[in-house]
Image: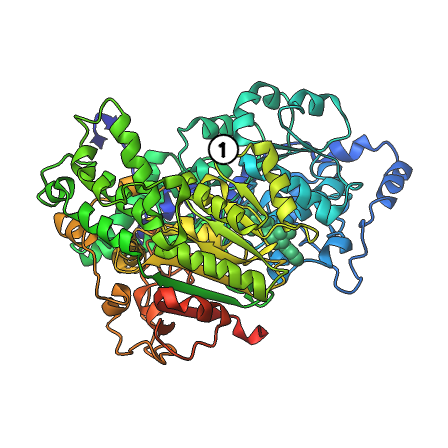
Amino acid sequence: MTLGGKEVEVMGIISPDDFNSGRCFQLGGGSSAALRSSQAVKKCFSNPFKSVCKLSSKENRQKSFQNCKPRHDPYAPNSLVMPQPDNNHQWMFSKNCFPVVDVVIDPHLVFHLRPHQKEGIIFLYECVMGMRVNGRCGAILADEMGLGKTLQCISLIWTLQCQGPYGGKPVIKKTLIVSPGSLVNNWRKEFQKWLGIERIKIFTVDQDHKVEEFTKSPFYSVLIISYEMLLRSLDQIKNIKFDLLICDEGHRLKNSTIKTATALISLACEKRIILTGTPVQNDLQEFFALIDFVNPGILGSLPSYRKIYEEPIIKSRQPSASEEEKELGERRAAELTCLTGLFVLRRTQEVINKYLPPKIENVVFCRPGALQIELYRKLLNSQAVRFCLQGLLENSSHLICIGALKKLCNHPCLLFSSVKEKECSSTWDENEERNLYEGLMNVFPADYNPVMFTEEESGKLQVLSKLLAVIHELCPDEKVVLVSNYTQTLNILQEVCKRHGYAYKRLDGQTQISQRQQIVDGFNSKYSTDFIFLLSSKAGGVGLNLIGGSHLILYDIDWNPATDIQAMSRVWRDGQKHPVHIYRLLTTGTIEEKIYQRQISKQGLSGAVVDLTKTCDHIQFSVEELKNLFTLHESSHCVTHDLLDCECTGENHTGDSLEKFPVFRNCQLGTHQQKSDSLKPVSMSQLKQWKHFSGDHLNLTDPFLERIRENVSFFFQNITNQTTAI
Ligand SMILES: Nc1ncnc2c1ncn2[C@@H]1O[C@H](COP(=O)(O)OP(=O)(O)OP(=O)(O)O)[C@@H](O)[C@H]1O
Ligand SMILES: [Mg+2]
């Protein structure tokens, strides 16, 4: 027959099952298992005698085979032996018909490995060896933050560099690791931590150490470079033959059109690993980009992927979907999961919890100071806010109002400085900020000087100051990580440190990348005299290890829960010796509570793709929502608690026994293959199960909370891993 001008011949009938699952569209037209064998057929015919004949005599062969012994004893107790390749694999990859030799992980490493890390290494080994999907050597390790993805990769590199299944010959010579700039030195440190400096020579690229040096020297086998440097040195990098490519925090490759992604795609290396702590299945388009990066072409072209998987899956999730559409979408999602599940691995933090000390998480609602309340009222009565609520202002003007309220919550002096700055600027007259700030100066005392700010002027700062004092007093050898997302706020916090004589380190967006690791090491060192680490989590918290600190204070709240979760994961991770205390400070009744509510509500959760790239600008607000945002609740102890519908009065509430509601997670690939993800912010229903205390509650057993209670209207508290005892 003729279809669209093309002559078509029917070759056979596709079974409904094959169509529904989408299998018939895959390479080779078969199931994932068939994909393996269809790939195998791709190998060109070669003379089976050729390789054998190369070995001129029987003697030679025997001699060369005699050396084919495993590097470490596979029968030793606790040895970790990699799976042997099957016949199909041997037929494809065993050059010269070398005998199969056990690949055994260095016992020195195995001694330290956690069970999930052993599994992870086997998984990575099978992937890059092409044993999971024949002819494909890519993998995505998407373990949650802090599970030791670095160590798993280091173990893999060290193993493949010294060993291989065929005659024991090493599989790789050179490895390229690309990571965010702030983590380049962390990689070096981790190599040294686990392998010492003798076993493996690694080269990190920075201002003083250029790629040429690596190219010229035969010693180095691992090159570690930042994404930015990679772009600058791409030409040299392309000339080096790398056998293994690892992209740390590889979530940034989710858009294949960005420069970094195109640069990396252009590298010839076949064995590719993406490391990311972020769930990868939440957005089907991004998922495609990541999958296609590690295993190019495995899902076909983007247009066909969209037709076969994305469209039916998304359609099936819509409320208007018919039964037929639902079924088709589910079948396609299942097939996609099955296919990609072969080389995507994600474990949640639960696997490591038992090795971690207890975590005591507190949400602390701080009473605003008198000046704060007065200024807050004034801002809410401003023309700018009123216009916003009438929908009269331009799109982004509500962001200016929100920004001003957030500053005020942190400290009135920040608002004072902003107003002063604007007043002096030439655009003040036309500026819509004028509508917001008008008359505000009259509320400040006449001689107000922002440099001489006091702690009493801000509810949170007062609580912070007391909290630091009590930690210093009760746990003199413990340290605090203090997080804000604003440089100006960090300046204030830094000033507080100075006033109280607390030694501190600071890392923010302006910190030189080359200095970051040094600062982190200095803080983590047991000899360090620092008490506080001032961190701008947005500017560079990703991937950092700050286990020197066991108290973490989140001074302000971000719209994106991922920012806060990232920060929290810096201290509660492997290697932490002390119980971890986390304090999230919120100003009672203000916009900070609203932002927190958004984080924990359904609405917030559905957008809670744990992705740091999502910013406040992406959020659309209805006029109703803005009304709620721009309301100050002066009489409530805790608006969030009021919303929970909880009967307790904050006296002795030790957690609700209500059964847990299933928490909705925005995973486009469906819920059937997702375990609970601990990187999600807590939900309303979970918060209900936390302990609730009002500030007036008399019997606070927590000595830290006891000390700050005077300035606090309400607490939520949750303890994880209590069994490991404080
Ligand atoms: N088996 C282990 N025993 C002790 N410490 C470990 C072990 N595995 C990892 N660690 C330590 O745990 C910390 C976290 O590891 P790592 O930085 O690799 O986490 P990650 O999975 O990359 O997390 P993120 O997503 O935050 O980057 C590091 O300090 C590392 O040295
Ligand atoms: Mg990492």
Q: Of 632 and 111, which appears nearest the observer?
A: 632
Q: Amino acid at mark 1?
A: Gln
Q: Is residue 207 above or below residue 575?
A: above
Residue 619 pos. (x, y %) = 25, 44
Picture coordinates of residue 365, whole percent (x, y)? 34, 62
Q: Which residue has dot 1 on it? A: 510
**For numbered disc 1, what is the local secondary structure?**
loop
Residue 218 at x, y = what percent? Answer: 77, 26
Give the image quarter of residue 585.
Answer: bottom left
Q: Residue at x 30, y 43 (%)?
A: 616
Q: Residue at x 62, y 24 (%)?
A: 207
The quadrant of the picture occupied by the C terminus is bottom right
The picture quadrant where one finds residue 628 is bottom left
Q: How many marks?
A: 1
Is residue 726 shown left or right of residue 413? right
* Image vertical order of residue 566 relative to residue 656, above or below: above
Whether residue 348 is visible here, answered yes or no, is: no
Quarter of the image that includes the N terminus: top left
Q: Residues within 10 Å of mark 1 (few under 14, many from 20)?
A: few
Q: Position of residue 598 (x, y in %)?
A: 28, 55
- Left or right, 545 with respect to 250, comes to right
